Structure formats: C-alpha cells, structure tokens
C-alpha cells in the first residue's frame, strides 16, 4: 500500500496553515512551501512535536515547540536557540514524502518509487466541464470495503430506494469487467432513476487500490464525471472523497457560486459560508442533497460489515457470478498486490 498514490485531502483544505492527515497509520503534515504542496512525517526531529501544530513562515515550516525551521526539502535551516553561524546538524532533516496536486485533490505516496502513476481524470481539466459538488465523509471501515460498496449495484434498490433503484426492479445489469493495466473497466446502460430523469450510460474505471472514475452519459452529449477516492487511514477507518463535474447547466447556482461542499453531514456554499438550513432545501440543490444522502445511507451498512477487512480469499464469503462480478474481479485484483488480509484474525467478528 505504501507504494501507491493515495488521496489525503481536498486541495482547498491546504491553505496558509499546516494540515495533519493520517495515511496507513502514518501521521503526515501537509503544507504549501515555495508555491507547491509538500508532505512530511508529522514529527519534528528535535523533540517529537507534531509539525502540524506549527506554522508556515515564508517558504519554511516552523515547529511550534522550539521554532526550528525547515525548507521545502525538509532540511532544517534555522535553530533559534543557538548562535548565528553555529552549524546545524546534518541529521536535522524531516522525512519527506511524494506529494502532488491533481484533479482538485492532494495525493501522497509514502514510497520514493510509486508503482503506478496518479489515476487520470481528463474531463476534470477540460474547459467544458465544471465542478459543482465536493464531498468528504469519514467512515469507520476499511478503504476496500468503501470502494466495493461504490460499485455494488445489488444494494441500490434496498439501501437507496427512490434515488438509485426501486425494489420492484431488483435485478442487476449484465456487465463485463475488462483489465486495463492497473485498472478495471466496466459499464452498463441504466434506466432513469431518482438522480437522472433520462436513461443514461454508466462507465467505470476502477484503479488499484482505491480510486474510481465514473462517466454518466445521456443523450446530446450531456455528461457527468465522478472522481471517487478513499484514504486508508488505518485498517479500521478511512475518508471518502468525491468530486463531480458536468458539461451542462453550467449557469446553475451550484456551478456559478459553487461548488457545494458536503462534509460529514455539514454543508458549505461556494463562498465558504456555512448553511445550517441547507438540508431543509434552503440553498442546497436537491440533486446535491440526494448525493450526500446516499453516503449517509451507506455508512451504517458498511461500517458494520464483518470481517472489517475485505476478504481477498473468495472462499471467505458467498459470491454470485452475475451481481457480484465486479466485486469478484476487484478482490482478485487486490490479491495480486500481495496484501496479507487474515479475515479470521483474533478479535474480529466472523
């Protein structure tokens, strides 16, 4: 997992102050130095103080405890408690991590040699597409369970009745999963649902380990793109990030004044102001409200799945060749990484 790129924050979240995030049980500090986002182990080498408690001074990150300053490469450049000209120890360096901003998100790799590039999302950079919705949800489950839930079509009529499906039509569409390097591709033709009033095609690209890019294409070239990625904080919790853009209705308030941002049940409008009444319909488009409702409906289901880890041994859970075709392919796909997941480890409910 350390050799993969992972989303850790929305780009908007990394501003003038250092930001602390947790990735694969590692505390990481994000900051902007020299015009770009930097990532370091969130630990000052002097006395083990989190650097996220400090601040940015010009192009350097300053520790709050003793004022040690570090440049964009993580090298200490100033120790206030010693006289000017006193040599700074060569070991006074932070542990840096690879960090990139792409598609409105901050990506971090804990290895110096990523096994694959950051997943591409070309439409998000095209002038004809505009972002109208950003979502961030913290879940107490594994990242793999959250990813599999996103592509599990069989639960739509039961968990999201009236939005993504109807119980009178529980059958899932036939899909063929194709391998494309580090990605799985699949799709289907969908009838109208609670989110879309017209029939549309859904196309997916699931990039290992925890990123999905989805296209929703209607007639006359109307299209939406979803970038969904999950941060694995640990083996027990994660954060889901979702960014949605479209190439139509670009004069709507959620595009002109947006994007609308939803975070753990709280909403902010495009100008950054909070809006406590938006769930009641004052200021938040109905469509964005439905998108956030989907995450809220899924959360208690996924957080209570057992075992908590996604079993990569297909014999651990019962699978159906039709409805579970994507899940089967994803579990086999993840097993290739050599991830050791023991679904029967002590202390885990079966």
Image: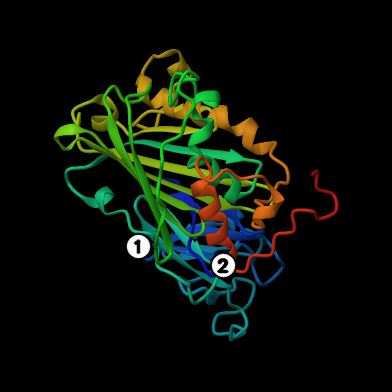
Picture coordinates of residue 76, whole percent (x, y) = 55, 75
Task: Give the CA distance from mark 2 to mark 1.
Answer: 38 Å
Residue neighbourhood size for the residue with mark 1, other residues' Cα within 10 Å, grouped as few (<14), some (14–19), many (≥20): few
State the residue at coordinates (65%, 47%).
237
Residue 4 rendering spot, x and y as whole percentages: 51, 66
Relative to the observer, which residue lies in front, 312 or 224?
Answer: 312
Q: Residue at x 68, y 71 (%)?
A: 46
* Residue 45 x, y percent position in the rendering: 66, 72
Quadrant in the rendering for residue 134: top left
Looking at the rendered structure, which numbered label has been put on residue 336?
Answer: 2
**Which of the 4 quarters of the picture holds residue 202?**
top left
Q: Is 231 above or below relative to 61? A: above
Residue found at the very far front of the displayed protein: 321
SS at mark 1? loop
- For the image, the number of numbered tags is 2
**Residue 140 shows in this picture:** yes
Q: Nearer the viewer, residue 174 or 309?
A: 174
Compare residues 300 and 163 and report the one nearer the observer.
163
Image quarter (top left, top right, bottom left or bottom right) of the C terminus: top right
Q: What number is the disc on residue 35?
A: 1
The image's colour scheme reads: rainbow
* Numbered disc 2: secondary structure: loop
Q: In the rendered view of the protein, which quadrant contains the N terminus?
A: bottom right
Question: Which comes before the other along the chain, label 2 or label 1?
Answer: 1
Q: Residue at x 58, y 51 (%)?
A: 144
Image marks 2 and 1: residues in contact by CB distance under 8 Å: no
> Viewer-proximal residue, 130 or 94?
130
């Amino acid at each position: 997992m350390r050799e993969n790129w992972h989303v850790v924050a929305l780009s908007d979240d990394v501003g003038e102050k250092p930001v602390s995030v947790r990735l694969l049980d590692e505390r990481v500090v994000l900051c902007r130095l020299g015009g770009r986002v930097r990532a370091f182990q969130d630990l000052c080498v002097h006395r083990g103080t989190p650097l996220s408690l400090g601040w940015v001074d010009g192009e350097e990150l300053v520790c709050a405890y003793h004022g040690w300053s570090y440049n964009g490469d993580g090298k200490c450049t100033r120790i206030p408690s010693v006289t000017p000209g006193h040599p700074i120890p060569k070991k006074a360096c932070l542990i840096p991590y690879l960090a990139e901003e792409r598609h409105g998100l901050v990506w971090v790799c804990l290895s110096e040699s990523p096994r694959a590039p950051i997943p591409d999302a070309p439409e998000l950079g095209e002038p004809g597409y505009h972002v109208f919705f950003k979502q961030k949800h913290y879940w107490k489950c594994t990242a793999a369970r959250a990813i599999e839930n996103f592509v599990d079509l069989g639960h739509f009529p039961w968990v999201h009745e009236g939005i993504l499906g109807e119980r009178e039509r529980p059958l899932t569409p036939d899909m063929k999963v194709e391998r494309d390097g580090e990605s799985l591709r699949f799709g289907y033709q969908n009838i109208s649902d609670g989110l879309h009033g017209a029939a549309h095609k859904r196309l997916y690209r699931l990039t290992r380990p925890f990123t999905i890019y989805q296209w929703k294409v209607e007639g006359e070239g109307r299209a939406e793109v979803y970038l969904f990625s999950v941060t694995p904080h640990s083996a027990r919790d994660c954060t889901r990030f979702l960014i949605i853009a479209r190439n139509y209705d670009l004069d709507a308030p959620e595009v002109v004044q947006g994007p609308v941002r939803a975070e753990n049940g709280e909403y902010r409008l495009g100008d950054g102001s909070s809006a406590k009444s938006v769930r009641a319909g004052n200021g938040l488009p109905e469509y964005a409200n439905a998108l956030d409702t989907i995450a809220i409906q899924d959360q208690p289901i996924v957080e209570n799945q057992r075992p908590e880890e996604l079993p990569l041994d297909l014999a651990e859970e019962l699978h159906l060749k039709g409805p579970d075709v994507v899940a089967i392919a994803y579990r086999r796909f993840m097993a290739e990484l050599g991830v050791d997941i023991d679904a029967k480890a002590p202390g885990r409910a079966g």
